Amino acid sequence: MAQEHILAQENGKERLLEAVSALSRAFALAVPHEKALAISDDVAFFQAVRAALTKRAPSQQRTEEALDHAIRQIVSSAVAPEGVVDIFAAAGLKKPDISILSDEFLAEVRGMPQKNLAVELLRKLLEGEIKIWRRKNLVQARSFAEMLEAAIRRYKNRAIQAAEVIEELIQLAKEIREADRRGEALGLTEEELAFYDALEINDSAVKVLGEPTLRQIAQELVRTVRENVSID
């Protein structure tokens, strides 16, 4: 797969993006010369590869709104001049319920022969999940984001191999999935869990007050906030 080959090269994505931009400019100037038209399919192919890499990698120009939609747009990564190909299908995977990150899907990603592509896919999926967490639990979201950034940084610095970072990202995916169940285990709503986690990061508070008291405080804080909102 073209994307996999590019991602495996040193600075491959950056070099490809620069080269395709130069090719596109030259092609636009040369058309409708017959020699330019003769390579139109090749130009379309490289433009499609560039589009796929751009949609699966963070962009400095991408807004927060675009990033929010990135994981849902991932299936529109163009990898052939004939049209759009589902990136999951291209990788030989079933399209997952991205909000769940099931064991079955994670196992499929682990088994992908295109390891660099698997890393990019997991990174984008996790970024989408973390963005959802930012809306409901900033403390947890920051923790997950730091773990993701640290793993990707080690991978980019070649401190760990693709297979190793895949295992780390799969473990992070499982932790995010389990975090969704913490509130239920503690008897807290999502809002109460957010306050609970904010209190829990203070180790001394946990030691002095204890878990039951922290739960009660979190519940009372949510109740107070709701009452104030109702009054306003």
Image (tube, grey):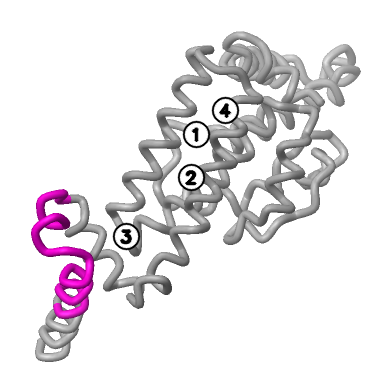
* Tag 2 and tag 1, C-beta contact below 8 Å: yes
Q: Is residue 160 above or below residue 69?
A: above
Which is more N-terminal, label 1 or label 2? 1
Q: Secondary structure at mark 2?
A: helix
Which residues lie in the magenta part?
202-220
Q: Specify the quadrant that holds the N terminus.
A: top right
Tag nearer the camera, 1 or 4: 4
Q: Residue lying farthest bottom?
A: 231
Q: Main secondary structure of the magenta part?
A: helix
Residue type pointed to by label 4: Val
Circle 3 Cα neighbour tier, 10 Å, few/some/many (<14 / 14–19 / ≥20): many
In the rendering, which numbered label is found on residue 165?
A: 4
Left or right: where does residue 193 sit relative to residue 4? left
Residue 104, given in percent of the width and then of the height, sits at 74, 53
Circle 2 Cα neighbour tier, 10 Å, few/some/many (<14 / 14–19 / ≥20): many
- Pointer 1: what residue? 58
Residue 11, given in percent of the width and then of the height, sits at 57, 11
Q: Secondary structure at mark 3?
A: loop
Q: Is residue 19 magenta?
A: no
- Pointer 3: what residue? 137
Q: Disc 1 and disc 4: Cα gap in Å?
A: 18 Å
Residue type pointed to by label 1: Pro
- Pointer 2: what residue? 127
Which is more N-terminal, label 1 or label 3? 1
Q: Disc 4 and disc 3: Cα gap in Å?
A: 25 Å
Which residue is at the front of the view, 163 or 149? 163
Which is more N-terminal, label 2 or label 4? 2
Q: Disc 2 and disc 3: Cα gap in Å?
A: 15 Å
Q: Is residue 225 above or below residue 49?
A: below
Task: Classify residue 15 by image quadrant.
Answer: top right
Residue 120, given in percent of the width and then of the height, sits at 61, 33
